[in-house]
Amino acid sequence: MKNKIILLSFLVIAAFCSCNKDTFHNTADKVGISKVTHYVVLKLKGEGIVSVVAGGSFTDPGADATENGATAQYSTSGSVDVNTPGLYILTYSAVNKDGFSSSVSRTVVVIAGHENPGVDISGSYAYVGSSTYTSTVTKVAEGVYTTDNCWSGATVIPCIFVCLDGANITMPSQATAFGELSGTGTLDVTGHLIYVVSIPAQGINNSSRNWQKQ
């Protein structure tokens, strides 16, 4: 009988404990006991990659910044020398009320002159020696293109390059996951695209990479 009373008492206590769960009260700033932080959301005004003809002018369109729906302050770092062809990065940064930072960047490419009318070398290119590997070249601004791979099938290195006449390519100095990259290149009438790439951090200087337009 004593054992039955002890077992019954245990079951009553267990049932009581199972019903006595913590009640979480969620608010705009908390989920239970965890604090919610709202990062500043930065959105570029205008395009992420723009080109400027050397000697011309560039007005930074800036960005929109909001924190939890309210307008927030941001700062801009970087500069553009409109008289010197090259690739320049402008970074817009903000810190929320809890001290957490966020940022977004714009690439400004200063080109030597206007592109020739009608030039557009966008398209799909296959790596010579292995058509399994392809890359996509996309025109993103006057005279400026991106490729999702300028190296080879085994190693993927995206980059930005300039082509004003449909035949000659300039790869302005730019940061990659493998180090600073720069180079030149050519595209002939048969669609044979050659990048001549240098990445000093990898001991690579003037390495030719061959692609064929599909």
Image (cartoon, helix red, strand yellow):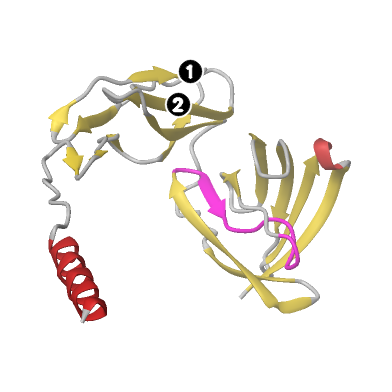
Is residue 120 something one can see in this rendering? no
Q: Is residue 25 visible?
A: yes
User: How much space separates mark 2 and mark 1, taking CA atoms?
Assistant: 6 Å
Q: Is residue 28 above or below residue 138?
A: above
User: Amino acid under label 2?
Assistant: Leu
Q: Position of residue 161 (x, y in %)?
A: 60, 45
- The spot of residue 50 in percent (x, y) is 42, 37
Residue farthest front in this picture: 1
**Looking at the image, do the residues carrying marks 2 and 1 touch, with CB atoms under 8 Å apart?**
yes
Asked which quadrant contains residue 118, the reply is: bottom left
**Residue that badge 1 annotates:** 79
Quarter of the rendering occupied by the N terminus: bottom left
State the extent of the magenta-drawn residues as a range: 142-155
Which numbered tag is attached to residue 68? none
Q: Nearer the viewer, residue 31 or 174?
A: 31
Does 108 sit left or right of 183 as displayed?
A: left
Q: Amino acid at mark 1?
A: Ser
For residue 125, above or below residue 25: below
**Which residue is the site of mark 2?**
90
Horizontally, residue 31 falls left or right of residue 57, namely left
